[in-house]
Image (cartoon, helix red, strand yellow):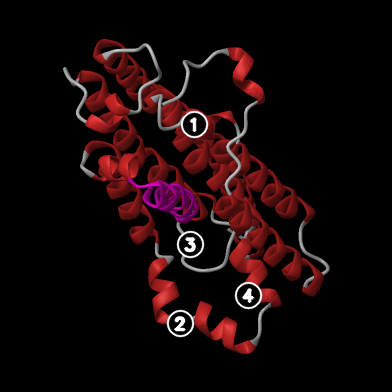
Amino acid sequence: MNAPFSWSHLNQWHLGLGGIALLLAASMLYLWGLKRVRAYSKCRTLSFCAGIIVTFLATESVLGVYDMSYFSIHMIQHLLLIMVAAPLFALAGPLDLLYAAGSTRVRAVLDGRIVTGLLHPLVAFLAYFIFIPLSHLTGVFNLMLNYEWFHHAEQIGFVVVGYLFFRVAFGIERGSQLHPGLRLVFVMAAVPVDTFTGLALMMTTRVPYKGLLDLAPMGTGGQWVLQNFHLGGAIMWIGGDALMLLACIPITIHWVRWETVRTRVIDAELDAMGL
């Protein structure tokens, strides 16, 4: 049980060997790919580095210290993982790098039915559609509170599900691609998931998870925990929707540019035909 949070706690860290080892392993693997593919995009590399930094801060900083005591901080951590770090990893194109740097066998696996199926837009959407409410509105949340290993697995799940979702939304990696206009629809169709989950959390009249009461900061009671629970719901609703809408901006810009280029090509073809 932690002491109540104050701004003087911002210098606290929750350094876990497992989490740091995973981040280092991912960084080393990406660096190995960069050495094999020398002409890889610098923007993608910077996106990967930013994703690693955001993931580290979300899990190992003061957010990791209080993520089990404050539901609101727990929700901030989740949004950072699935809607900030994951999109950055999607922009980094890790599978493209692995495909370019890997062996023939690696490329065969990436082109195989299993990986192709897992990367399908419908799978990405369903994963997001199911994972968000499942991890917040069911007994899965209690498992996270009771078992540290499950908590870490859930954090990984947020990054993976977010990556699968935003790689489709951004459409910069090889594989199944949506029309640029459909990518915008793809993202907007997921907004109600965050809205529903956030509102469901805000409207509860009691704390649904006993673990939150057991892990609440010292000197707090059930009413405080409920209020913080409602605050977490508001963060999910407003913060989640805002980040989704923010992601729509580059998608819309890309769509407009794509339509402009396509219009020019069609006009050139019509001119060549004398129409």
Labels in figure, total: 4
Q: Which residues are magenta?
A: 147-164
Which label is found at residue 243? 1
Marks 2/4: CA–CA distance? 12 Å
Label 2 or label 4, whichever comes before in sequence order:
4
Quadrant where the N terminus sits is top left
Label 2 or label 1, whichever comes before in sequence order:
2
Mark 4 secondary-structure assignment:
helix
Label 3, on which residue?
177
Label 4 or label 3, whichever comes before in sequence order:
4
Q: In the image, is 104 to the left or to the right of 111?
A: right
Marks 2/1: CA–CA distance? 33 Å
Marks 1/4: CA–CA distance? 30 Å
Q: Is residue 208 above or below residue 98?
A: above
The amino acid sitting under disc 1 is Leu
The amino acid sitting under disc 2 is Gly
Marks 4/3: CA–CA distance? 17 Å
Check the image and name the residue furthest to the left.
205
Of circles 4 and 3, the one toward us is: 4
Label 1 or label 4, whichever comes before in sequence order:
4
Residue 155 forms part of the magenta stretch:
yes
Label 2, on which residue?
112
- Circles 2 and 1: CB atoms closer than 8 Å: no
Mark 2 secondary-structure assignment:
loop
Report the front residue among 93 and 222: 222
Q: Would you call the spot at circle 2 few (<14 residues within 10 Å), some (14-19), or many (20 or more)?
A: few
